[in-house]
């Protein structure tokens, strides 16, 4: 219920977003020359700012000039491709694509700011909170979810390892998010400002 409520609230805010504050526009201009962006937010503000600034972006450093890596998932991601594990035959529509090579998380590259599940009775396929939260998956789906979690964190760690400077904005690494905290602390040593 909470996942669905969060998704509905964020999509409502997304739909009513007419323009971005100047700070986001300035962020997109600075990000243009960076290695990538790591965001723990589910919303699409970062992506919209990059799009408005004409910065080509994608969800993987393997497929995009500027990667937007989201270890906690994204409002516009689905897990259609994970459903083969439980015998459910839901396939991605033609305009869906994996967020990264070998990922079972997907989105609509041609329409990244549209709700991919609008009008569909499949809210359980939303992937906005901890896509690799293994407690959320049954034993058949768990290995596929663990693989996606590993892919996201591998890209996160690779991006951080290449960076000389890392800037975190507005994220506190709370106690309940031990996975993010531990992985980032191990990878970011000496690079944080």
Image: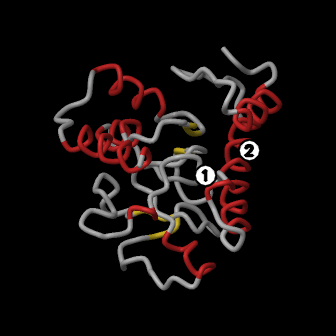
State left or right for residue 186 relative to residue 135. Answer: right
- Residue lying at 83% horizontally and 31% vertically, measured from the top left: 186
Give the colouring mode of the picture.
secondary structure
> Which element is circle 2 on?
helix
> Which element is circle 1 on?
loop
Q: Position of residue 82 (x, y in %)?
A: 58, 72
Q: Is residue 9 above or below residue 95?
A: above
Tell whether label 1 touches label 2 (CB within 8 Å): yes
Q: Is residue 9 above or below residue 64?
A: above
Depth check, front residue: 54 or 5: 5
- Residue lying at 70% horizontally and 35% vertically, measured from the top left: 180
- Marker disc for residue 158: 2
Q: Is residue 181 above or below residue 22?
A: below
Residue 31 in view, yes or no = yes
Q: Is residue 169 above or below residue 138?
A: above
The mark tally for this picture is: 2
The 10 Å Cα crowd at callout 2, few under 14, some 14 to 19, many 20 or more, is few
| Residue with the mark numbered 1 | 61
Q: Position of residue 68 (x, y in %)?
A: 52, 44
Q: Position of residue 143 (x, y in %)?
A: 74, 67
Q: Residue pushed farthest front? A: 1
């Amino acid at each position: 219920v909470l996942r669905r409520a969060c998704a509905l609230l964020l999509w409502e805010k997304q739909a009513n977003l007419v323009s971005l504050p100047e700070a986001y526009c300035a962020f997109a201009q600075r990000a243009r020359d960076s290695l990538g962006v790591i965001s723990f937010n589910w919303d699409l503000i970062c992506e919209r700012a990059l799009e408005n600034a004409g910065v080509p972006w994608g969800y993987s450093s393997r497929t995009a000039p500027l990667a937007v890596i989201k270890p906690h998932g994204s409002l516009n991601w689905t897990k259609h491709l994970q459903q083969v594990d439980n015998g459910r035959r839901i396939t991605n529509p033609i305009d869906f694509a994996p967020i990264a090579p070998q990922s079972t998380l997907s989105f609509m590259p041609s329409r990244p700011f549209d709700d991919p599940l609008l009008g569909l009775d499949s809210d359980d396929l939303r992937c906005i909170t901890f896509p690799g939260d293994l407690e959320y998956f049954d034993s058949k789906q768990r290995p596929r979810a663990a693989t996606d979690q590993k892919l996201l964190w591998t890209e996160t760690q690779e991006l951080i390892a290449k960076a000389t400077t890392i800037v975190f904005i507005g994220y506190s690494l709370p106690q309940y998010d031990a996975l993010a905290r531990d992985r980032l602390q191990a990878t970011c040593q000496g690079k944080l400002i």
